[in-house]
Structures are given as C-alpha cells and as structure tokens.
Image: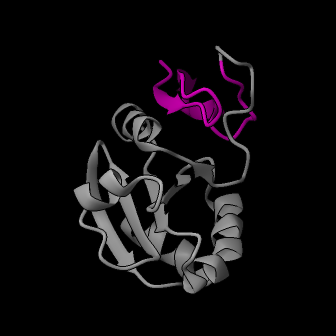
Amino acid sequence: MTTSLHVVCPHCHAVNRLPVDRLSDVGTCGKCHSQLFTGHPVELDEASFDKHVTRSDLPLVVDFWAPWCGPCRSMAPSYAEAALQLEPHYRLVKVNTEQSQNLAARFNIRSIPTLAIFRNGSEVARQAGAMDTGGIVRWVKSNG
C-alpha cells in the first residue's frame, strides 16, 4: 500500500494527492497541469497562505519579509537557493508583510526577516534575522 501526501499547487493552489514514493518525481497539478515543485519560493497572500498551511502535508517554511527591508533583500537569494535544496520535502514560501498585514499581525511578526516553519497547521519553529543558504537549510532540517 502506497501512502500519499496532500500537496498544494504553487500556481493554482489546488490540493493534489501525491504518493510518497513519487515525491522526488516532477509531479504536475491535476487541475492546472503545472509542476508541483519549481525549486523557487512561492509568493502567498492571505487566502493562499491559509490553504497551504491547512491542506498541505509538507512542512511549510515561511519567509515573512518586506520590500523596503535591506536584510530581507540580501537574504532573498539564499532563501531561493535553499528552496532548490529543500524541495520536495519542504515547501518554501514568502509572505510580503506590507501586502499581508493581517498575516503579520496574526503571527505576531515583530521583526523581519522572520522565518517560521508550520506543520499540520501549527507553527513549530521561528527564527528572526537574515541567514545564509547553509544556515537556512540547517535550521529547517533541524526544526522541520
């Protein structure tokens, strides 16, 4: 018997069922036929954030950031590189705290960049401050 995971499409946000033993394959969404894993962080708004947090079986790594934040901009390439290394076992996403102020308030984001890991709808770890690629990967693997 093959166990499956629910994976939310980064493009249309449809929920897909993917067999665990096929997780490393380049799967496509059953609705929009786009790749389920792109190796890039996914930009989320409030509605899509809630769907990814509550419906995906993958741990969700969130970068809370803002365009005016220098450390956020300097960490962005490292975060993108970390997405290449951590997918398909983790979904890395970005939430712009200027555009999604309610999310920032809901999760009590006081400084940016802040990384948070969610599993099964709940926050399991949080780290404030910019990190390099190696630091992000190590932190995610030890906490996710």
Choose between 30 and 141: the one closer to the eye.
Answer: 30
| Residue 34 screen position, x and y as percent | 75, 27
Q: Which residues, given as a range, are shown in magenta? A: 1-29
**Depicted 67 relative to depicted 4: above or below:** below
Choose between 23 and 92: the one closer to the eye.
Answer: 92
Q: Is residue 139 magenta?
A: no
For the C terminus, give its image quadrant. Answer: bottom left
| Residue 131 screen position, x and y as percent | 55, 84
In which quarter of the view is residue 85 placed? bottom right
In which quarter of the view is residue 81 placed? bottom right
| Residue 78 screen position, x and y as percent | 67, 75
**What residue sits 52% from the left and 84% below the top?**
130
Q: Is residue 19 magenta?
A: yes
Choose between 26 and 95: the one closer to the eye.
Answer: 95
Image position of 143 (left or right of 24): left
Q: Does the image show residue 85?
A: yes
**What residue sits 38% from the left and 60% below the top?**
117
**What residue sits 56% from the left and 72% below the top?**
137
| Residue 28 screen position, x and y as percent | 72, 25
